[in-house]
Image (spheres, grey):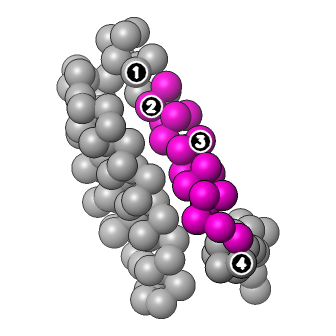
Amino acid sequence: MEHSEDSLSLAMYEYSGICSNDRMNYFNRIGEKKWSDLIEYGIVRGEFNTVNVKEIVHVILYAYQGVRMWSRIVSMTPEVYDLITNHIRKQLIKEQ
């Protein structure tokens, strides 16, 4: 049984095949901007470590998309998801 998010992902992949790269690059830039703004906000507030924002944004965006695509092919365990999110968390969150 497909979830609505699965249908949305499939629709995005299908749409990307019929539209220009400019359109998909536009969607990607929006994601980069939103994640960058969020991370910069967390850094300014002292809630996130001072990180290379561009670097961590690309890790987040492409890890997320990679997991979504790869998980359609192979079984992804909760451990794999935890390893990925823990890595990102360790980069961003200041240890108490």
Answer yes or no: do the residues labelled 2 and 1 have beta carbons within 8 Å? yes
Q: Which residue is mark 2?
A: 36
Cα separation between marks 4 and 1: 34 Å
Dot 1: within a 10 Å radius of its alpha carbon, few (fewer than 14), some, or many (20 or more) residues?
some
The residue range painted magenta reads 19-37
Which numbered disc, 3 or 1, marks the residue that appears first in the sequence?
Answer: 3
Across and down, in percent, residue 23 comes to 66, 58
Horizontal side of 52 relative to 25 (left or right) equals left
Mark 3 surroundings within 10 Å by alpha-carbon count, few (fewer than 14), some (14 through 19), many (20 or more): few
Of 58 and 24, nearer the camera is 24
The one nearer the camera, 72 or 11, is 11
Image spot of residue 68 (x, y percent): 51, 71
Q: Amino acid at mark 2?
A: Ser
Residue to which mark 3 is pinned: 30
Real-space CA distance between mark 2 and mark 3, rounded to the nearest whole angstrom: 10 Å
**Is residue 10 visible from the viewing direction of this image?**
no
The residue under label 1 is which amino acid type? Answer: Glu
Residue occupying the point 48% across, 90% down: 73
Provide the residue designation for mark 4: 18
Query: Depth-wise, is mark 2 or mark 4 nearer the camera?
Result: 4
